[in-house]
């Protein structure tokens, strides 16, 4: 996962997929949606255990209290078995993992803290390698019990402080053609002496495709529209129209009077990929009783940079009302290599409301 571009919906969905157990180790936890999801899974019979960094009680205290009150097995990390910063006596658990049902782990560079979701570049990996997951669970069990352990590297893991430095140095020293480093802070000077020569070949027209999700704030979980443009009141957290996941959605119309709402986002669709898929979850409810007339409509369109409609992907109406959400997907390969705008337009007539509720949008390329 690439954050903040792809949003946190996949993390929430991962937690809510648990049927047996959830084990989480986290440096900072200040995401009420995630905390509530954990409590709800515990109440549903899933064993939930959480380790919070002991040195950030001012940040983690609210989550600790809510989790504890909800019956979740929550504990603060022990200073005896975690990393000690080389420049001070400050001891903390910097790990950020979630393991579900003992079969799959989410490993993240970012904290689960809504304070930073919209402004921090972070990456996450869903790891289903059995050796990796077993190693993460083994360390979790030891840390939860506050007993010492030497972590196993599984298939692809590195651990601090036991072996990360040697593995990272080996990776760096093994570079033959290119080395890309993206790091919040770098103060380790081990092995800093030396020189090498790299040749960089940049060919933007090579047609190479990097899998990606292109929409920003795809699940509206920032609580605001940006980078979407939306009519006033569209970004919604009301229980009257609950989201497909998370806490927020985009609620177009629902007024029962002549009204139009829009939701749009400009996006650059690169060339060179074999798959371009737009997807979104849509809920429609209505007070209309007709079974033949489309009085209220939602159009899904692609526009060029000048605002000209290039194509209408679909039009929904009060006749398409359903209980719950349905996912819709569309092929956008015709727009590869273009700067376009994805636009949803909801229009109501003069009476009887129809609500068009959109959530968990994505443009996935691969």
Image (cartoon, rainbow, N blue to C red):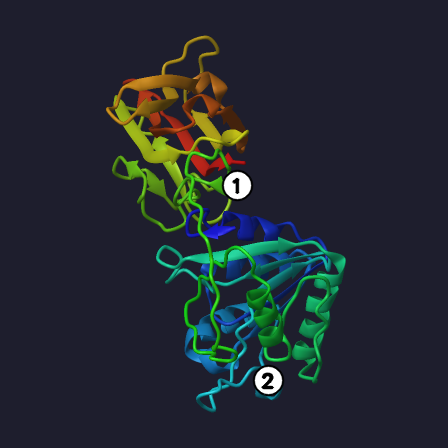
- Residue located at (38% from left, 38% from top): 250
Is 162 rendered above or below residue 16? below
Labels 2 and 1 touching (C-beta < 8 A): no
> In x, y percent, where is residue 236?
36, 43
In the rendered structure, the answer to whether residue 110 lies left or right of residue 296 reads right
Mark 2 to mark 1: distance in Å?
Answer: 39 Å
Q: Which residue is mark 2?
A: 78
Label 2 crowd bin: few (<14), some (14–19), many (20+), radius 10 Å: many
- Residue located at (36% from left, 23% from top): 302
> In x, y percent, where is residue 348?
31, 21
Q: Quadrant of the C terminus?
A: top right
- Residue located at (47% from left, 65% from top): 111
Is 226 rendered above or below residue 338? below
Q: Secondary structure at mark 2?
A: loop
Which numbered disc covers residue 211? 1
In the rendered structure, the answer to whether residue 357 lies left or right of residue 27 reads left
Could you say which is closer to the camera, residue 295 or residue 107? 107
Picture quadrant of residue 312: top left
In the rendered structure, the answer to whether residue 337 lies left or right of residue 37 reads left
Could you say which is closer to the camera, residue 178 or residue 364? 178
């Amino acid at each position: 996962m690439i954050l903040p571009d792809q949003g946190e919906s996949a993390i929430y969905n991962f937690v809510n997929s648990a049927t047996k157990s959830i084990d989480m180790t986290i440096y900072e936890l200040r995401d009420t949606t995630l905390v509530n999801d954990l409590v709800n899974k515990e109440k549903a019979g899933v064993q939930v255990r959480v380790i919070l960094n002991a040195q950030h009680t001012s940040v983690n205290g609210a989550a600790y209290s809510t989790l504890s009150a909800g019956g979740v097995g929550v504990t603060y990390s022990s200073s005896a078995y975690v990393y000690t910063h080389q420049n001070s006596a400050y001891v903390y658990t910097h790990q950020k993992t979630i393991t579900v049902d003992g079969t799959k782990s989410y490993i993240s560079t970012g904290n689960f803290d809504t304070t930073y979701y919209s402004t921090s570049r972070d990456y996450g990996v869903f790891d289903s390698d059995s050796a990796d997951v077993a190693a993460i669970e083994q360390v979790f069990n030891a840390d939860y019990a506050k007993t010492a352990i030497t972590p196993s590297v599984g298939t692809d893991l590195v651990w601090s402080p036991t072996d990360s430095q040697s593995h990272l140095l080996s990776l760096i020293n093994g570079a033959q053609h290119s080395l890309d480093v993206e790091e919040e802070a770098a103060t380790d000077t081990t092995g800093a002496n030396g020189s090498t020569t790299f040749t960089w070949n940049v060919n933007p027209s090579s047609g190479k495709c990097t899998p990606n999700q292109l929409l920003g704030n795809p699940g509206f979980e920032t609580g605001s529209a940006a980078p979407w443009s939306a009519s006033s009141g569209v970004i919604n957290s009301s229980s009257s129209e609950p989201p497909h996941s998370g806490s927020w959605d985009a609620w177009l119309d629902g007024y029962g009077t002549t009204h139009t709402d829009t939701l749009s986002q400009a996006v650059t669709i690169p060339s060179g990929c074999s798959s371009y898929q737009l997807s979104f979850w849509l809920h429609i409810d209505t007070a209309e009783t007709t079974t033949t007339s489309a009085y209220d409509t939602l159009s899904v369109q692609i526009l060029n940079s000048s605002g000209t409609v290039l194509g209408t992907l679909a039009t929904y109406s009060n006749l398409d009302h359903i209980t719950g959400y349905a996912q819709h997907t569309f092929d956008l390969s015709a727009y590869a290599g273009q700067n376009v705008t994805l636009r949803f337009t909801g229009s109501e007539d003069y009476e009887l409301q129809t609500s068009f509720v959109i959530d968990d949008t994505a443009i996935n390329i691969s």
